[in-house]
Image (cartoon, helix red, strand yellow):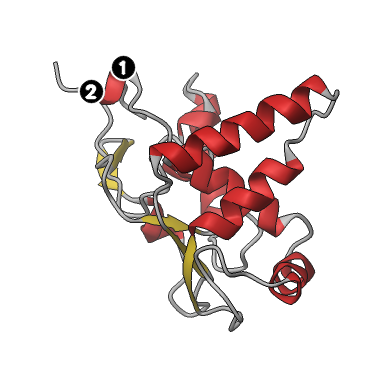
Amino acid sequence: MAMKRPPQHRADAKIVYVHPADSSWDEERILREQNEMKKRGEKASDHPVSRYLGGWTRYDLDAPSTLDGKTVTPREYLDPTRPATEWHLKRLSTQDRCEIENLIDQERNAGSNMPRKAYLRACNMALASVECGPELDGYLGRMTADDFDTLDSMFPGLPLDIGGAAYVASLPLRDDEKKA
C-alpha cells in the first residue's frame, strides 16, 4: 500500500531527469505494481515512478517512497543493464524562474496551451550535463540549435520536457515540503 506521509525527498537534491520513454525504465514492473495499487483502491499516480515523473519529488531519483510496506526509490525501477540517459539540471534562480514565468504568461495570453518558448528557455538555462547520452556543444545557456535538434531527435519534445522538469523542480517549496 502506498502510504500518505510528508515528502521524503530533499528539496535541495540534485535534479536528475530521466525521460518517461527511456528504455531503462522497468515498464513491466511499474505497470504491474500500478495495477496492484488500483486493485487495492489506491491511485496509480501515487506510485514512486509516477510521482517522480510528475515532478512531485523534484526529480530526485533517490527519493524514498513507501510502496506495499517497503521503502523504494525511483532509481530502483531503472534497469542497470540498460543505462538511463540522465539529464542533470541546475536549479533555476529566482530571476531565471521569473523570466520563465513571464514567458509562460505571454504564451498563455496568446492562447497557447504549451509554453514552448518558456520551456525551451528553461532547458537552455538549466541543462548542466548529460550522462549516458549525446555529447552536446553547449550547456547552461550555451546550447546551440544543433543541440536542440539532437535532443528532439531522441524523443520528440524532449527539450520541452527537460525545460518543464527544470521549471517544476525550481518552483518555491509547496506547503507539504516546508518545515512545520
The percent position of residue 108, horizontal first and vertical second, equals 76, 24
Tell me if 22 is positioned left or right of 157 in this view.
left
Residue 136 at least partly seen: yes
- Name which residue lies at 43% across and 33% down: 171
Residue 21 vs 52, above or below: the answer is below
The percent position of residue 15, horizontal first and vertical second, equals 39, 54
- Name which residue lies at 53% across and 30% down: 45
Q: Nearer the viewer, residue 7 or 122?
A: 122
Picture disc at residue 134: none
**Is mark 2 in CB contact (under 8 Å) with mark 1?**
yes
Residue 51 at least partly seen: no
Q: Quadrant of the N terminus?
A: top left
The percent position of residue 131, horizontal first and vertical second, equals 47, 76
Q: Residues within 10 Å of mark 1 (few under 14, many from 20)?
A: few
Q: Secondary structure at mark 2?
A: loop
Q: Give the residue type at disc 2.
A: Lys
- Determine the residue located farthest toward the right in the rendered image: 111
Q: Secondary structure at mark 1?
A: helix
The percent position of residue 160, horizontal first and vertical second, equals 68, 50
The residue pinned by badge 1 equals: 175
- Name which residue lies at 50% across and 19% down: 41
Q: Give the residue type at disc 1.
A: Asp
The residue pinned by badge 2 equals: 178
- Name which residue lies at 61% across and 81% down: 137
Cα distance in 3D space between marks 2 and 1: 5 Å
Residue 46 vs 134, above or below: the answer is above
Tell me the quarter of the picture where residue 61 sits.
bottom left
Q: Nearer the viewer, residue 78 or 94?
A: 94
